[in-house]
Every structure is written in structure tokens, then in C-alpha cells.
Amino acid sequence: DALLDRYFYTVQKRNDMIIGSFRMPVVKQYEEMDTIVIGEIESGDCRVDDQCLTMPNCARVEIKNIYYEDRETDSCVCAQNIRFALKNVEEVTIINHQSKIYVGYSAVLHIHATVVGVQLKILITLIDRKTGEETLENPKYIKQDQVAMAIFELSQSGQTICMELFEHFPRLGRFALCHEDRTVAVGKFLKIIG
């Protein structure tokens, strides 16, 4: 009975992802005769001649060709790794550790296919790993194996990035923080501020 429930939940979740808005993080971009972008479709579907928005710059582009497994096709759906040829593209923007992390700490944030510099602005609270309860408000630092809620800010003024909340899109709502080529923290986006 539990197996059947899990099956129907999985099928429903898959249907929700196919029916949802088209979303595809761009993993790679290059120029040939047209601008070519490569990625995995996380939600929705699209067809040749569809109009899409590239984010975060909100540029409108048109899908000229779709390639799936090196074959040209006229449509694609969620969970496929595809390659698009785009029309109307001017620019598509596709960047020994201390033992404690303090406010002001700078690192590189990896969100799916995006890499940007960030700085820790506020440590809100420490959270007990086992119970999920808040244990200390406004801690001075975070140590290894601690869980915390924090606010980060993009290092480059005026820069924008695309992200999803973990509760809406778990695969796009996770991040990793790296410093000097080492992963120093992993987490989930719970809230977007500003």
C-alpha cells in the first residue's frame, strides 16, 4: 500500500514538473552561426519557435532549433538534457580554510549552473541538527558541523542571479559555498530578501 502511494506521488510530482513553467539553467553557452545553450530542463516543456526569457537580464529570445541526444527535434520536456539554437540574442549571461565563519566572510556561491561571489551579512540563528529548533540567536560565528540560518549578499553591486526557494524547486533551491577550491558549506534557499 505504501509502495502504491509512493508511486502515485512520484507520478503526480513528475506531471507537475512537466506542466509547470519552462525552466532550464544554462550550463554552457557558445557561438556558432547562432547562440547555442546547453542544459537540463527542470520544469515544463518547449517547442521550436517558442519565445522565452533569459534571466536575470529578462532578454526575450526565440528557440530556433532543439537538439536532444544529437538529433534535431521540434519539442522537449522536463528532465531532458538538450541543446538550443537561439534567435534574437544580444547577450546571455552564463564565475587552507579558517575554522570559524564570521559576518563579513567572502566565498563563492554555487547554485546549480551559476557561480558568484557573496559575502556573509548576518548570522540569524544556530539550529540544532537533530531537532531543527533554534538554539542561539545572533551567533558571532559558525563552526564546522553547525547548522545556521544566515543572510548573504552578492559581492558585485548591481548584479542579479536566478534562484528558487527549496520548498518550490528542491533541485534548484540548493547551494554550495566554496573558498579556495574547497566546499565549506552547503544549504537550501529558504527565503529571498530584497
Image (cartoon, rainbow, N blue to C red):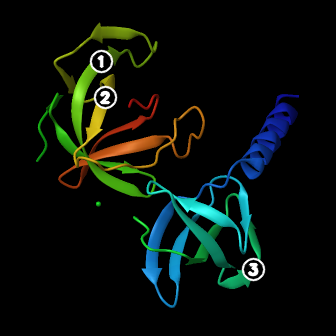
- At horizontal 58% and vertical 78% (from top left) the residue drawn is 87
Q: What amino acid type should be assigned to the residue bearing mark 1? A: Ile
First in sequence, mark 2 or 1: give its number.
Answer: 1
- At horizontal 33% and vertical 8% (from top left) the residue drawn is 135
When the figure is inspected, residue 13 is found, relative to residue 23, above or below; the finding is: above
- At horizontal 44% and vertical 54% (from top left) the residue drawn is 56
Q: Residue furthest bottom?
A: 33
Position in image of residue 40 (x %, y %) = 59, 63
Query: Can residue 68 be seen at all in this image of the molecule?
Result: no
Residue identifier under label 3: 73
The answer to whether the residues at label 2 and label 1 have Cβ atoms under 8 Å apart is yes
First in sequence, mark 3 or 2: give its number.
Answer: 3
Q: 80 or 53, which lies in front? A: 53
Residue identifier under label 1: 124
Q: 120 or 180, which lies in front? A: 120
Distance Cα–Cα, label 2 vs label 1: 7 Å
Q: Quadrant of the C terminus?
A: top left
The answer to whether the residues at label 3 and label 1 have Cβ atoms under 8 Å apart is no
The answer to whether the residues at label 3 and label 2 have Cβ atoms under 8 Å apart is no
Distance Cα–Cα, label 3 vs label 2: 43 Å
In the rendered structure, the answer to whether residue 182 lies left or right of residue 135 reads left
When the figure is inspected, residue 176 is found, relative to residue 143, above or below; the finding is: below
Position in image of residue 140 (x %, y %) = 16, 18
Q: What amino acid type should be assigned to the residue bearing mark 3? A: Thr
Bin the neighbour count of mark 3 within 10 Å (Cα to Cα): few under 14, some 14-19, many 20 and up: few
Residue identifier under label 2: 151
When the figure is inspected, residue 55 is found, relative to residue 109, above or below; the finding is: below
In the rendered structure, the answer to whether residue 162 lies left or right of residue 137 reads right
Q: What amino acid type should be assigned to the residue bearing mark 2? A: Ile
Which picture quadrant has residue 147?
top left
